[in-house]
Image (cartoon, rainbow, N blue to C red):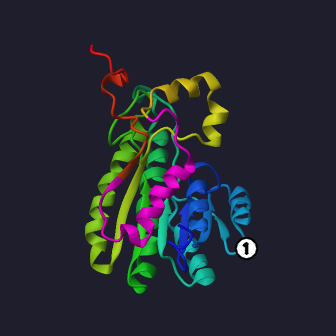
Amino acid sequence: MDELLKGKSAIVIGAARGIGAGIAEVFAGAGARVLVADRDGDKAKETAARLGTDHISAALDVSDKAHCEAAVKQAEAAFGGVDVLVQNAGIFPWTTIEHISVDEWDNVLAVNLRGCFVSAQACLATMRSRGGGRMIFTSSITGPRVSSPGHGHYSASKAGINGFIRAAALEFAPWGITVNGVEPGNILTEGMKEARSDAFIKQMEASIPLGRLGTPHDVGKACLFLASDLGAYVTGTTIIVDGGQILPEGGNLSIEPE
């Protein structure tokens, strides 16, 4: 696995911590040089330094096209180009549809959905000049597969990402660029540990057929497949990384007859 991305360069957005940091770590371990981009520039710098001297960082608001274009130029100057883009940045405020303000709705879609569009557009020219590339977007099981009260805007943004993946895959295929996504379930990140009690986390684990929450590296390994030559003939689709979370009917894991 340590040679799968040897000689490749990657931009991972939303990579200061959590799932994004896990993706960056897996890519670095596979030989890629990584630009760690995040709205929290200081934390992004810390994460890049932890990966090693071959890696760099950028403070980036993914909803801002100019920020994405600047990150691409930074990667071109440092690495010679961009072979892999991962847009992982996302926000998920909890508000029922009745109470979502227009500004909150627009902000969620700007980061989660517009961020995919402007980051892909920013990377297109450099990938085309290199004869191909890989674009990977972090969607979710929430929206495309399931949903919950309070996540109307989040669900809409993530379902939109899956539609964008299919359209971009068709448009970019003639240039040798594949476009795919991952749909994580419940992943045990720093944020989850800070926001949820141990009892709540154990309850979540009990609802998952594999009996545990996912790790950022679980998502990173799915991204590695899509970013490497192993996934060269895969485009326009997503990989669900959820330990079987969406499989049980009615949340029932029992094998006893009803």
Query: Is residue 1 depicted above or below 221 in this figure?
Result: below
Q: Residue at x 29, y 61 (%)?
A: 236
Residue 252 relative to residue 21: left or right: left
x then y, percent, for residue 180:
36, 61
Tell me the crowding category of disc 1: few under 14, some 14 to 19, or many 20 or more residues within 10 angstroms, Cα based: few
**27 lies above or below 163:** below
Image quarter of the C terminus: top left
Magenta run includes residue 65: no
Q: Does residue 8 show up?
A: yes
Residue 220 image offset from top left, x and y in percent: 52, 56
Q: What x and y, as percent, mark residue 140?
A: 42, 45
SS at circle 1:
loop
Left or right: 41 as drawn, with respect to 96: right
Q: Is residue 115 visible?
A: no
Question: What stretch of residues is rendered in magenta?
Answer: 210-238
Q: Amino acid at mark 1?
A: Thr
Examine the structure image and report whether residue 231 is included in the region drawn in magenta.
yes
Q: Between residues 68 and 144, which one lies in front from this camera angle? A: 144
- Residue furthest to the front in view is 256
Q: Is residue 81 toward the left or the right of residue 144 in the image?
A: right
Along the line of sight, which residue is nearer the eye, 246 or 129? 246
Residue that mark 1 sits on: 53
| 131 on left or right of 26 | left
Give the vertical position of 92 relative to 83 (above or below).
above
**Quarter of the figure with residue 189:** top right
Q: Residue at x 54, y 71 (%)?
A: 10
Q: Is residue 196 above or below residue 239?
A: above
- x, y percent for residue 145: 32, 39
- Residue drawn at x 60%, y 70% as measured from the top left: 34
